[in-house]
Amino acid sequence: MKPKTKSDSVIANVSHSLLVGLLLGVTSLLVLPAAAIADQQPPLLSNVSSPTVAANLFVVAQHDNLVSIFNPTNGVRLGQPAVGNHPLRIAMNPGGTRAYVSNNGGSTISEINTQDGTVVLPAISVTSAPQELTVDPNGAYLYVVHQAGPEGCPQTLTNTSVVEKIDTALRTVVGTPTTIDGMLAKDVLVTPDSMYVYVANYNAGVVDIIQTSNMMEVAKIMDAPGARRLAITPPGTLSPPLVFVTDFCANPTGTVTVIDTGTRMRAHDDIGVGTNPRGIAITPDGTKTYVTNVGSNNVTVINNTTFAVLKTIPVGPTPWHVTITPDGNWAYVSNSGSNTVSIIQIAADGGQWVKDLTVGDGPFFSVVNPANNKLYVSNSHTGNPPDPGTVSVINLATQKVVATITGVGNGPFDLALSGPQ
């Protein structure tokens, strides 16, 4: 699909206001029909800022070079602003007023004003192939890492990449980008005090720790091969916070590395999990970590105090991603190999599998709404014509798929909700 021009974007259609979409949400049924929601001509967002940021759903359509914006209550599409080439990931600032999209096929970051749906121009210029990105807890800086090479195991070290710090007010890269070994940086997070950035360096087999004040690398944690995803214990749970790293290419089985953010050293020996660990999530109380093992079709549950494996829970084929609800009671696992979502009831002993729900083709990322009553799942293999691209909606009270949002675009991938994060 040809990228949309400014005249095609939400900026050119200001006659339909955000209020229309919000009123539709109030008057619609709270439980949506299980049949697909019709692809409607969207009432595009107004360009008049609102003092309250609505919790709208933003979905990256990676093969259509756009972001679809939906009212999550009724599934009405509110806008489809065009972004850069092959967008992949989306990150919200803490207030949920700005969304940042990495355009992996080019050298830009697109910034979206979530209050009116417009793309802020010009795009933010960065080094080529931006991928993972995150905003610091203060909202002042955006950190971006880059991927410019093929995945696979085993990995060999090839060339170098950079980590960039972007001033969100000035919309420019601060200083000189930090160079790291390897071209497959797969994840990035900022510590709660905003002082350090951790980078999962996939083909270098390390975790790079960078001091944010001067963007100098202060530690390099030697990791098992294929450092893939990072998770940090929530503020106020463990002191100091711990960073958990999935090691996708570790042999003969996968491992999880644990890093003490106080000493910036390993907190424990690598923890053995399943084959090809990837997705990772920590319970809100900081006590347990859930890891999806793509190659062995199960989830490993780790006790974050003793570092013992509490339980291994079978799920569906190819479990890529896991989301834990804000109340800490449930984990939802996206199984791309079976087009299902596995539901795990969390308990002190690690919990148990409850059931699988059938969703769309290639379920990947998921997000829970602020009311903690619905889960939205991107079906990443949908969107090739005549398929409109879909997001599945799961009611968390009934544990059922209650709707399918259509008209998302080709290759729905990452997704996020606006509003306070």
Image (cartoon, grey):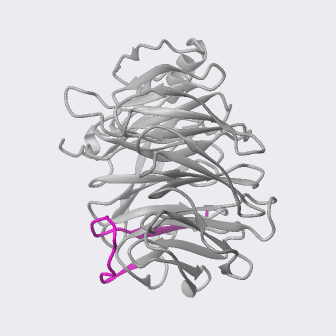
Residue in view at x 25 percent, y 27 percent: 387
Q: In this rendered view, identify the residue nearer to me: 235 or 304.
A: 304
Residue 148 position by quadrant: bottom left
Q: Which residues are magenta?
A: 139-161
- The residue depicted at 38 percent of the width and 34 percent of the height is 338
Give the prevailing secondary structure in the magenta stretch.
Answer: loop
Task: Give the mark count.
Answer: 0
- Residue 169: tell me if it is visible: no
Quarter of the N terminus within the rendering: top left
Magenta stretch encompasses residue 113: no
At a point 75% along the width and 55% down the height, the residue shown is 286
Q: Looking at the picture, how far across and down is residue 335, in whole percent?
A: 44, 39
Q: Position of residue 380 (x, y in %)?
A: 35, 40
Residue ID at (18%, 44%) = 2
Q: Is residue 289 placed above or below 259 in the rendered structure?
A: above
Can the viewer see residue 341? yes
Of 162 and 366, the residue lying toward us: 366
Is-magenta flag for residue 158?
yes
Q: Where residue 287 appears, x then y in whole percent? A: 76, 54
Query: In this view of the protein, which residue sits in the foreground, 231 or 249?
Result: 249
Q: Is residue 87 left or right of residue 34?
A: left
Question: 417 or 276: nearer the eye?
Answer: 276
Q: Is residue 83 above or below residue 201?
A: above
Indicate left or right for 320 with 389 as reference. Answer: right
Residue 320 in the figure: left or right of residue 369? left
Residue 404 placed where, x, y %?
A: 42, 22
